[in-house]
Amino acid sequence: MSTEITLAIIGGSGLYNLPSLQNVETFDLETPYGKPSSPIRIGMLKDRKVAFLARHGIGHVINPTEVNYRANIYALKMLGATRILAISACGSLRDDFAPGHIVIPDQLMDFTRMRPRTFFGDGLVVHISSADPFCTDLSALAAKAAFQAGGIVHPNGKLVTIEGPRFSTKMESNLFRGWGLDLIGMTSSPEAFLAREAEMCYAAMAHVTDYDVWHTSEQPVSVDMVVRTLHQNTALAQNAIQIMIENLPTSCNCGCEHALESAIITDPAHISPTIQKKYELLIGKYLK
């Protein structure tokens, strides 16, 4: 079902659609892992094909734990996407990452507890490398685009994903600060790791909306605070996406596209035809 998509956007809190898309087609897909969060819109942007998926559903009806991350990534893979830019709202764990700033994280800690973390199992064992969980090439392009769009951009950051949907306690927030983490969010895990298993480049554009609850001179994070900052940053995010689209090279040479090459540990002779068929989209090229 490949459509030669230049970039897939997973829109998080505050970016529920991409109004600049033209000649839009909508794909309402079913995957082996269920339905994705929303129908996927594919259209033209700057003469290049772009896909858009609303992570929390139309109208923001799915909380971070309930998001079907596997179906979302798999559906984009079905449509032929090879690169994903994820937009998310995050809290800052340091003074210099202020609300309104954009951070392109380069490291990720998974502090979630209730989410399926892999596509694989049922007789197929895969150990994916995740030393650098974000695609370095795509992240660099995202940082450059956000800067050119007028944002205050931090090109690196260590992000922790919590389960949610509640915000942190002060003890939790200060614990994460003590561990040297920079950002706190609710959606990058397992999204980034599943994208790696699907051999897709993945970068995140994190919009800092608050100082979580650790900052003694600031109000604790609230929904109103998050929404207000996201509204102010929506135009910036949309402009950055358009700039990024113009600068994307036609092919990937970062290694993400071969992530499974040395990750499958199960002896091919012991992978049943049923399992081969189930995972054909993901591992078919390694079983021929």
Image (spheres, rainbow, N blue to C red):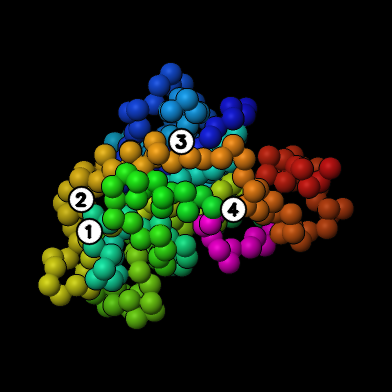
* Residue underneath mark 1: 99
Q: Earlier in the sequence, mark 2 or mark 3?
A: 2
Q: Earlier in the sequence, mark 4 or mark 1?
A: 1
Using a 10 Å C-alpha cutoff, classify the residue at mark 4 as few (fewer than 14 neighbours), some (14 to 19) or many (20 or more): many
Q: Earlier in the sequence, mark 4 or mark 3?
A: 4
Q: Nearer the viewer, mark 4 or mark 3?
A: 3
Does the magenta-highlighted stretch encompass residue 131? yes
Q: Quadrant of residue 52?
A: top left
* Amino acid beneath label 2: Thr
Q: Is residue 99 above or below residue 253?
A: below
* Amino acid beneath label 1: Pro
x and y percentages locating residue 124 in the rendered image = 73, 55
Say if mark 4 contacts mark 3, CB within 8 Å.
Answer: no
Q: Could you tell me how far apart the alpha carbons at marks 4 and 1 are, in whole angstroms?
A: 29 Å
Q: Could you tell me how far apart the alpha carbons at marks 4 and 3 are, in whole angstroms?
A: 24 Å
Q: Which residues are magenta?
A: 126-136
* Amino acid beneath label 4: Arg
Q: Earlier in the sequence, mark 1 or mark 2?
A: 1
Using a 10 Å C-alpha cutoff, classify the residue at mark 1 as few (fewer than 14 neighbours), some (14 to 19) or many (20 or more): some
x and y percentages locating residue 25 in the rendered image = 46, 21
- Drawn side of residue 11 relative to residue 255, left or right: left
Can residue 122 be seen in the rendering of this structure? no
Q: Which mark is residue 246?
A: 3
Using a 10 Å C-alpha cutoff, classify the residue at mark 2 as few (fewer than 14 neighbours), some (14 to 19) or many (20 or more): some
* Residue underneath mark 2: 229
Q: Residue at x 59, y 30 (%)?
A: 4
Say if mark 1 contacts mark 2, CB within 8 Å.
Answer: yes
